[in-house]
Amino acid sequence: MNMLAQLQALQEEMAKQQALLAEETVEVSAGGGMVTVVATGQQEIVSISIQPEVVDPEDVEMLEDMVLSAVNQALERSRQLAEERLGGLTAGLPPGLL
């Protein structure tokens, strides 16, 4: 019975941490700050800012590369944040237990 209570407490703590992750954000810039992406701790992109001077109709590919780079970096940092918050809670548990 004690094990069941511990699992229930763990599930409650994980739910709490996941709710907090939804409110935390990470911000990443690319191109020397020309493109900025903000993502939540749940890997949701909430904003993308592009400085007007980087918009060049003759070089759309460069802008696309900067946006892609910033988004990928923001998602990676978001995953790292989630791992920091949740990783310790599930260490040693068999997969699929929760």
Image (cartoon, grey):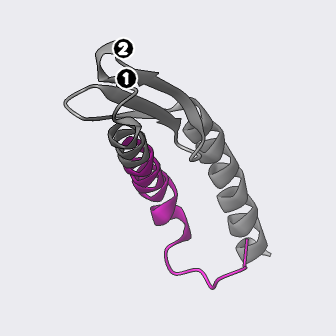
Part of the protein shown in magenta: 70-98
Is residue 40 rendered to the left or right of residue 62? Answer: right
Residue found at x 46% / y 59%: 83
Q: Which residue is mark 1?
A: 55
Is residue 52 rendered to the left or right of residue 23? Answer: left
Q: Which residue is mark 2?
A: 52
Residue 86 rendering spot, x and y as whole percentages? 52, 57
Is residue 11 rendered to the left or right of residue 37? Answer: right
Q: Is residue 93 above or below residue 7?
A: below
Q: Secondary structure at mark 1?
A: loop
Q: Which quarter of the picture shows residue 53?
A: top left
Residue 60 rendering spot, x and y as whole percentages? 40, 36
Between 7 and 60, the one lying in front of the other is 60
Q: Neighbour class for label 2 at 10 Å: few (<14), some, many (≥20)?
A: few
Residue found at x 34% / y 35%: 59
Residue found at x 80% / y 75%: 1
Residue 6 rendering spot, x and y as whole percentages? 68, 66
Between 52 and 25, the one lying in front of the other is 52
